[in-house]
Amino acid sequence: MFIPRRVTSGIESGLRLEAAVSILGPRQAGKTTLALRIAASRPHVYLDLERGEDRAALRYPRQFMEANEDRLVVLDEVHRTPDLFAELRGIIDEGRRRGRGAGRFLILGSASEALLRQSESLAGRILPVRLGPLHLLEVTDHASLPTLWLRGGLPRSLLADSDRDSLRLRRALIETYLARDIPYFAPRFAVETMERLWAMLAASHGTLLNRARLAAGLEVSAPALGRYLDLLVDLLLVRRLPPFRANVAKRLVKAPRIYLRDSGLLHALLGIADANQLLRSPFLGPSWEGFAIETMLAAAPWNTQASFYRTAQGAEVDLVLDLPGRPRPWAVDIKYGSPPRLARGFRIACRDIDPERIFVVHSGERRFPIRAGVVAISLPELAALLADFDPATP
């Protein structure tokens, strides 16, 4: 089953503007399916560069690209051929001189920074598009919010016949990362250490990053921990939510908050198999918070800056959204349960940062005022509000 993705229009418009568009996203997010869906409307050729025979087709890349100049060339898992980018630069420039300056390459990768570093030679010739797991506004007709939250947004996991099958798929994906991707991108890393770190981050989901505690638990140095963590962020598996930088006369925390980006992988690492276990779990609140944050950021307009606010005294805003074109941010508190209560620390934090709009996201369905200027709202409604955001409208 194909579920339409909201980024499709951005990819199509990118192909009209530039010679190459890169689609960056975690493994099994649906990059290949979406790319082939887009390519099906025009002549194209597809190469999976994890396959030796497809890599062999690019032994002489210039000749191959010239033979397929009138086709869209889809290059999957392009990190397997890092030297290709230098060749593509010349191929694209030559094509521009012949009037073939747009819509030539779709480049797919599952490691964000690795691919972006490789593609630096294509500056001015490539547009990056990020494809995350399926989110709430995309699955309305295919899955309920509780199912999406439990299973996560990776299509095979979400659409599995049962919760048990979904969990097996997610555990197999974790093994694939540990057995294949991590040794490829970081061959000097100890896979067992990475596995333990991943589990520790799941148990720390939604908390401030404590580098010293994690390094001591893994028996590695602080710089080594940083490299391990950087890889999980690069693979688009972990989010480091930065602290809000505010000009206030208070001492603010400096450490980022850590979240596993897909709730389904979080639950697999925590051993949560079904909705009943989730509702009884001590991780219920942090899981809902991370799920809500990923949902809102997936729906928010391009160039939205996200952070959190926390003082040393405990005043806190779970999510601060700096939306493009707006002089003041939105403040969002995230609570599981309805009706939500407004914490004193949240009220103090809102006075500090002076947000334009204040929301309390809850797990119910109603929208209602809590106090002047503060609205309790469901996650689907706030996601829709962000998706329809117009910077010209107050």
Image (spheres, rainbow, N blue to C red):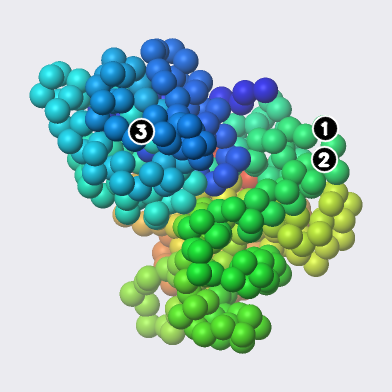
Q: Check the image and name the residue furthest to the left.
A: 97
Q: Quadrant of the N terminus?
A: top right
| Residue 264, image x, y percentages | 71, 49
Q: Would you say residue 205 is visible in this rendering? A: no
Q: Amino acid at mark 3?
A: Leu
For numbered disc 3, what is the local secondary structure?
A: loop
Q: Quadrant of the C terminus?
A: top left
- Residue type beneath disc 1: Asp
Q: Which mark is residue 165?
A: 2
First reached walking from the N terminus: tag 3 or tag 1: 3
Q: Nearer the viewer, mark 3 or mark 1?
A: 3
SS of the residue under disc 2: helix
Between residues 193 and 392, which one lies in front from this camera angle? Answer: 193
Q: Is residue 304 left or right of residue 215?
A: left
The location of residue 35, given as percent across then percent down, is 47, 27
> Which residue is labeled 1 in the image?
161
Q: Earlier in the sequence, mark 3 or mark 2?
A: 3
Instruction: Look at the picture and state if 46 lies above or below 325.
Output: above
Q: Are marks 3 and 1 in contact (CB under 8 Å)?
A: no
Number of other residues with Cα within 10 Å of mark 3, as a class: few under 14, some 14 to 19, many 20 or more: some
CB within 8 Å, label 2 to label 1: yes
- Give the answer, above or below, for where 218 lies relative to 365: below
- The CA distance from mark 3 to mark 2 is 38 Å
Give the residue drawn at x 64%, y 56%. Answer: 179
How many numbered marks have been drawn onto this rendered protein structure? 3
Q: Residue at x 81, y 59 (%)?
A: 271
In this view, the residue in front, 344 or 169, is 169
**In the image, residue 148 lies at what x, y percent?**
71, 41
Residue bearing mark 3 = 58
Identity of the residue drawn at 43% across and 45% down: 80
Q: CA distance from mark 2 to mark 1?
A: 7 Å
How would you rate the neighbour count of disc 2 (Cα within 10 Å): few for under 14, some for 14-19, many for 20 or more?
Answer: some
